[in-house]
Image (cartoon, rainbow, N blue to C red):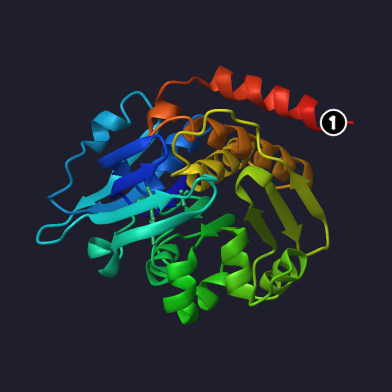
């Protein structure tokens, strides 16, 4: 089933203990699309300014990512983000955030994309996520990501969005912030009460957990990676593997959701082994499948 994503396209500066990567390609929609395209064709919707130094057509060459929804907006500027990772590589500080084009009108969904069924609203302003969703005729499964800056500054729009989506994907600190609740189980339940049927909470090296409105819970550790170079994009790649797998399988039953979480987990494990898209651009679907099998063995008893 057609999978559509919207989110940020960013010029990132990332600092980790391994070094600094300045003005590299990033953005939630970029990581998501690259990761999801290992599983399913992706329809990409996003906006950049004329200052964007990256040629996305070249970046996605050979990948099944349709860039018909990429807008270059005159008189605007590309989103910029910079972050520094702490020594544990799980936590980071945002050094600066320049919303630029993300603070403006949403991108337009091309007519040929409006019949998309699987939708991922990657990290961007909740208002844009809502306005994009309104352009889709018959969404079947909608997942969204969010983060602390939107929870703190755009809560009203975020709450409206939560009523319109099937699954919210966010990290553990964000879940606690959104629910105003320290205990993650209680936080998950509280977020379910805000609208989505599923809440998928990412816990960095500790893996992820899924809560469902019917009370079912699923937990999975992260794939163990020895050399973590840059965790940027791990969450978006996780979501890409998750949604890409579901779109390819055309179902969201309980078994498929669990398999999708495992595929998201191993896809993200490659992202963090390099800066920017380097960890993902050097692998094939076979590499993902091998780690999936290993993860399955490591977590069965
Ligand atoms: P992740 O590490 O999965 O959270 O994703 C990091 C990517 O998200 C970076 O490449 C940034 O460009 C992008 N990003 C960071 N902050 C935001 C934000 N507030 N809205 C949209 N995208 C963001």
Q: Position of residue 188 (x, y in %)?
A: 71, 66
Say which quadrant the N terminus sits in: top right
- Residue 248, image x and y in percent? 59, 35
Q: Tell me: 278 left or right of 50.
A: right
Q: Tell me: residue 23, above or below residue 98.
A: above
Q: Quadrant of the C terminus?
A: top right
**Relative depth, front residue between 186 and 43:** 186
- Please tell me which residue is depicted at 38% across the width and 28% down the height of the picture: 278
Disc 1: which residue? 300
Disc 1: CA contacts within 10 A as few (<14), some (14-19) or many (>=20): few
At 48% across and 50% down in the image, what residue appears?
86
Where does residue 205 sit, x and y in percent of width and height? 63, 43
Residue 263 picture quarter: top right
Q: In the displayed structure, would residue 206 be above or below residue 96?
A: above
For this orientation, the residue located farthest to the right is: 301
Residue closer to the observer: 81 or 141: 81
Tell which of 112 and 64 is nearer to you: 64
Extreme residue toward the left, this view: 75
């Amino acid at each position: 089933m057609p999978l559509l994503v919207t989110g940020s396209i960013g010029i990132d500066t990332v600092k980790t203990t391994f070094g600094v990567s300045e003005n590299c390609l990033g953005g939630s929609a970029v990581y998501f699309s690259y990761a999801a395209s290992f599983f399913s064709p992706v329809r990409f919707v996003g906006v950049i300014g004329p200052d964007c130094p990256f040629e996305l057509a070249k970046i996605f060459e050979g990948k099944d990512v349709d860039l018909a929804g990429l807008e270059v907006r005159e008189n605007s500027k590309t989103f910029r983000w910079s972050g520094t990772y702490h020594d544990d590589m799980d936590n980071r500080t945002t050094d600066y955030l320049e919303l630029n084009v993300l603070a403006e009108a949403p991108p337009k969904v091309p007519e040929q994309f409006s019949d998309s069924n699987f939708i991922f609203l990657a990290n961007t302003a909740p208002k844009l996520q809502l306005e994009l969703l309104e352009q889709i005729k018959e969404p079947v499964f909608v997942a969204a990501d969010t983060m602390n800056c939107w929870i703190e500054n755009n809560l009203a729009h975020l709450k409206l969005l939560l009523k319109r989506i099937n699954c919210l994907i966010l990290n553990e600190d964000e879940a606690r912030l959104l629910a105003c609740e320290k205990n993650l189980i209680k936080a998950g339940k509280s977020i379910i009460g805000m609208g989505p049927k599923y809440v998928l909470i990412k816990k960095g090296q500790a893996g992820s957990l899924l809560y469902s409105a019917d009370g079912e819970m699923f937990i999975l550790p992260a794939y163990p990676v020895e050399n973590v170079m840059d965790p940027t994009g791990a969450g978006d790649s996780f979501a890409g593997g998750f949604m890409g797998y579901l779109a390819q399988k055309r179902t969201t039953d309980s078994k498929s959701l669990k398999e999708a979480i495992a595929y998201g987990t191993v896809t993200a494990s490659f992202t963090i082994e390099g800066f920017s898209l380097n960890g993902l651009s050097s692998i094939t679907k076979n590499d993902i499948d091998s780690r999936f099998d290993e993860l399955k063995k490591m977590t069965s008893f």
